[in-house]
């Protein structure tokens, strides 16, 4: 049986390593931290969550729920660690990030088939004796990204993503903020900072005049004309826009986006405020909160000034400021097979954000698939891709079949899943019921695929 080399100890890499090892394979897991870090990681831990602590919705029959259900049924090790590290977050799965990483480290340490190497990998050898899973993430070190480009012959694509600030709970004015769940759905775990119209207008004016950070050279898209690039150079991922960019799009745009007050009834007035900033608990001790959807690219001093205009945060202590960062991913539709193998070098699989999926859970899911596919290849068996009907299969289908020229990473949504047949669509008018049916048939197809796949060694 061939050895498996997994590069990257973030989210996709450890899940792939644990899956392949559970299927009986010998695995080497290379991680460059702490010898060399990335622009966003702060620790040397496996499975570090670099920004929010949320693995998205647990509401039944939503697309993120479906993805997680499939992963749980396949024995996802990282979801198991996430479930055991959960903190209250309404109908979402949010985790204590340190506890989560600790549990993943324990799982890896207790798996004798995994050898961990702390090293920066700079070369890829399409070697017949080794199956490689490249899971080095959106901040893949430059020598490795160059190597990947050399190997694939295609350009890599850079664009901007952003991370939101975290405040110390002690600095929040609890007299001004209130706990509520939107539309009273789930438990009231979010703290809400309510704005009047005057406060919102003043906040918007301050935001518009605040100074932003200049882009670093490592953030710039590649200049090589043959490389895939985006124009204009500051190309944000639409699902993760900085607040100053959203504000630029119209005075009400924030109020209909991350500052949406709908369904958040203020207990004192019995009404919705004019706008709201939501704070989500960061850890089990509940001693810090992140500003939901408040990623931004303002200078740190400017962030302190502007964000302290949020009612309730006048004396906030910032534990982390918002930031902007590079994101690297391959042109998957041109390069990858549905089994995540490079078309040109089938012994190399690409997993995680680098493969063109977007988000923590999606990255873990892609690691889960890559680990299973790599285990099959190590045995000399060509793997069967996850079924198209499933959330996992739909994500792989999207990244391998989207328009290559305009390819953008995607989170899991129902848009990626095959729609119901025309006749059924005509019969079932209710969107929620359609989603329920899509989930039901996805899980049935997933279970069948799992039953036909190799089973983990107890
Ligand atoms: C700053 C930032 C904020 C994000 N915020 C969110 C968010 O809030 N919510 C969300 O769902 N998603 C977010 N994402 C997107 C994505 O979900 C995460 O990046 C996720 O961690 C991707 O998982 P991964 O395993 O693909 O990569 P990573 O978790 O980044 O893991 C890759 C690992 O590879 C290592 N590595 C890199 N190069 C080498 C090399 N040459 N040799 C050895 N090791 C190497 C890195 O050190 C890292 O540990 C964010 C991304 C970034 C960059």
Image (cartoon, grey):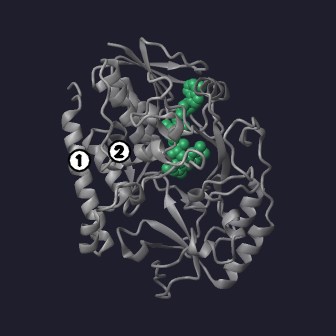
Q: Secondary structure at mark 2?
A: helix
Q: Which dot marks residue 445?
A: 1
**CA gap, disc 1 to disc 2?**
10 Å
Q: Quadrant of residue 139?
A: top right
Name the one closer to the observer, 215 or 249. Answer: 249
Q: Taking the image as drawn, is residue 32 in sight?
A: no
Q: Which mark is residue 393?
A: 2
421 or 89, nearer to the observer: 421
**Residue 58: quarter of image:** bottom left
Judge left or right: residue 176 versus residue 11: right
Label 2 Cα crowd, 10 Å radius (few <14 / some 14-19 / many 20+):
many
Left or right, residue 188 beside residue 207: left
Q: Are marks 1 and 2 in contact (CB under 8 Å)?
A: yes
- The picture places residue 211, in percent across and down from the top left corner, at 81, 59
**Residue at image point 61% right, 61% down:** 294
Q: Residues within 10 Å of mark 1 (few under 14, many from 20)?
A: some
Q: Position of residue 24 (x, y in %)?
A: 28, 20
Q: Residue furthest front?
A: 422
Q: Quadrant of residue 188?
A: bottom left
């Amino acid at each position: 049986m061939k050895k498996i080399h997994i590069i990257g100890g973030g989210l996709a890499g450890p899940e792939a390593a644990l899956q392949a090892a559970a299927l009986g394979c010998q695995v080497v897991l290379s991680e460059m931290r702490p010898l060399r870090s990335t622009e966003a990681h702060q620790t040397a831990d496996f499975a570090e969550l670099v920004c929010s602590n949320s693995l998205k919705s647990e509401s039944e029959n939503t697309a993120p729920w479906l993805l997680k259900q499939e992963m749980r049924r396949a024995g996802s090790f990282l979801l198991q660690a996430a479930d055991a590290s959960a903190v209250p977050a309404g109908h979402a799965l949010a985790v204590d990030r340190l506890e989560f990483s600790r549990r993943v480290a324990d799982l890896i340490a207790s798996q004798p088939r995994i050898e961990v190497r702390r090293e920066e990998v700079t070369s890829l050898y399409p070697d017949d004796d080794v199956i490689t899973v490249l899971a080095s993430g959106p901040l893949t070190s430059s020598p490795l990204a160059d190597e990947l480009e050399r190997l694939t012959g295609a350009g890599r694509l850079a664009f901007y993503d952003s991370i939101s600030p975290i405040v110390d709970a002690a600095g929040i004015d609890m007299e001004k903020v209130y706990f509520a769940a939107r539309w009273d759905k789930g438990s009231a775990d979010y703290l809400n900072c309510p704005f009047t119209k005057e406060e919102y207008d003043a906040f918007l004016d301050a935001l518009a005049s605040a100074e932003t950070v200049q882009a670093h050279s490592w953030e710039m898209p590649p200049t090589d004309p043959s490389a895939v690039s985006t124009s204009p150079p500051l190309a944000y991922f639409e699902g993760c826009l900085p607040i100053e960019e959203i504000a630029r799009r119209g005075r009400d745009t924030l109020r209909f986006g991350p500052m949406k007050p709908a369904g958040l009834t203020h207990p004192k007035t019995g009404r919705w405020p004019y706008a709201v900033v939501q704070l989500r608990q960061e850890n089990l001790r509940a001693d810090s909160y992140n500003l939901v959807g408040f990623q931004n690219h303002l200078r740190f001093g400017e962030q302190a000034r502007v964000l302290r205009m949020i009612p309730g945060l006048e004396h906030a202590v910032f534990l982390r400021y918002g930031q902007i960062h590079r994101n690297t991913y391959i042109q998957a539709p041109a390069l990858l097979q549905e089994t995540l193998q490079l078309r040109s070098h089938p012994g190399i699989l690409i997993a995680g954000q680098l493969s063109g999926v977007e988000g923590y859970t999606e990255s873990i899911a892609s690691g889960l698939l890559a680990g299973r596919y790599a285990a099959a290849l190590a045995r000399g068996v060509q793997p069967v891709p996850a079924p198209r009907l499933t959330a996992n299969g739909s994500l792989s289908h999207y990244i391998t079949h989207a328009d290559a020229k305009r390819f953008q990473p995607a989170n899991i949504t129902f848009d990626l899943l095959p729609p119901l047949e025309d006749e059924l669509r005509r019969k079932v008018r209710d969107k929620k019921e359609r989603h329920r049916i899509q989930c039901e048939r996805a899980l049935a197809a997933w279970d069948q695929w799992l039953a036909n796949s190799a089973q983990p060694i107890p």
